[in-house]
Image (spheres, rainbow, N blue to C red):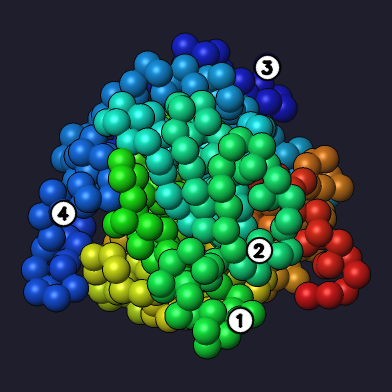
Amino acid sequence: MYETKILLDENEVPKYYLNLCAQLALPPPLHPGTKEPIPAEALEAIFPKSLVAQEISKEEKIPIPQEVRDALILLCRPSPLVRAKRLEAHLKTPAKIYFKNESLNPCGSHKINTALAQAYYNAKAGTEQLVTETGAGQWGTALSCASALFGLKCRAFMVRTSYISKPLRKTIMHSYGAEVFPSPSNETAFGKSLLAKDPNHPGSLGIAISEALEQVAQGKNTKYSLGSVLNHVLLHQSIIGLEAQTQLKKAELVADTVIGCVGGGSNFAGIAFPFVKDVLDGKAHTKFIAAEPTACPSITAGKYEYDFGDTAGTTPLLKMHTLGKDFIPSPIHAGGLRYHGMAPAVSYLVQQGIIEARAYEQERTFEAAMLFAKTEGIVPAPESSHAIAATIEEALACKKSGEEKTILFNLSGHGLLDLNAYESYMNGLK
Ligand SMILES: *Cc1c(COP(=O)(O)O)cnc(C)c1O
């Protein structure tokens, strides 16, 4: 039993989100002018009240509305926990490697988990249009899909390098009825100012966020939606780790190491935070590894300080690991990991010594991805490949030490919409 896949029934999809932030002493977001903590109501200009309440909630468990649970079950949940036996055999490791497969939904990544929740809460609050940014396009795809399901209009500012290198991403978003603009764009004053200096500006997530926020400030019944970083986004992703805990329990396994890639920190937090809770509560000794690219090493080379979430300096100041709001990462293929900052909650736990971060070169992540494709049959998203590289590193360490550890990683998405990235890699174009 449970040799290859650990599956759950629909009724085992979590009914509550786990709000780890409730038990963390997170430094508050500050007003950039006064440097005073900003009142929660200030956030209600860009988010519906219900999501602001989740952002600052001190409740340990937050119920998942039935409509959201239904939509999650319709599209993607529960997701399987799979043992990567062939990868283990190839590596000749005594470690057991399990991955939570978040790639099996129509949008191809974990981002649908929060997109559905955010679209639901907005629709309920009377929002008519959502505006957002998207890096590689996974978030834009997920929010477009969720907006369509809950009857909202959706506009996405897509980082220009990705817009050009991943043209079919906009086709999916268009299929869901969304509008997509390469960022920097001519749609906003901030975008125009950057294009005036450089008509071929590559863009960045920070810039795309600024453009989206500028439009939200001008739009009617328009709200902003963010795919990562903030507490409420991490909250929605907690269902990944909660399901994984139920699955491991069924197979009578205990995770020794939990691994995820980090862009803004949401898929990592999603799988890890329920396990982090057990560590904080003194019930477990799990090791956590956040894997990031050397091209955008927010945690391993950034500073833990207050910084803006966007490039124009529109957002409140967040205490996080940051490379600086003006940092423009080189156009690596893992577009979803090209963000200058990191979720404040993930940053805080790194600072507390609970989470370890490691950075991986692109070359090494593609090697890991190709090995995973050949052994497990799944072409992973370039982002997820960072988690696979870290998993392989850990599994090889077990081979050296002879330890039979159970390693759990999050397969945050598949790479079938990123095949041009694989094509470039195989053609030797880095
Ligand atoms: C967006 C994305 C990431 C990075 O974002 P996080 O918020 O750090 O999870 C990782 N993997 C995939 C597949 C993504 O789409």
Kind of residue at badge 4: Ala
> Residue 178, image x and y in percent?
56, 42
* Label 2 environment density (alpha carbons within 10 Å; few <14, some 14–19, many ≥20): many
Residue named by callout 2? 162
Residue named by callout 4? 42
Residue named by callout 1? 199
Determine if the C-beta at disc 4 is less than 8 A from ligand 1.
Answer: no
> Residue 21, image x and y in percent?
25, 47
* Label 4 environment density (alpha carbons within 10 Å; few <14, some 14–19, many ≥20): few
x 52%, y 84%: residue: 196
Q: Is residue 22 left or right of residue 6?
A: left
Marks 2 & 4, CB-CB < 8 Å contact: no
x 86%, y 47%: residue: 374
Marks 3 & 2, CB-CB < 8 Å contact: no
| Label 3 or label 2, whichever comes before in sequence order | 3
Kind of residue at badge 3: Met
Quadrant of the drawing holding the C terminus: bottom right
* Label 1 environment density (alpha carbons within 10 Å; few <14, some 14–19, many ≥20): few
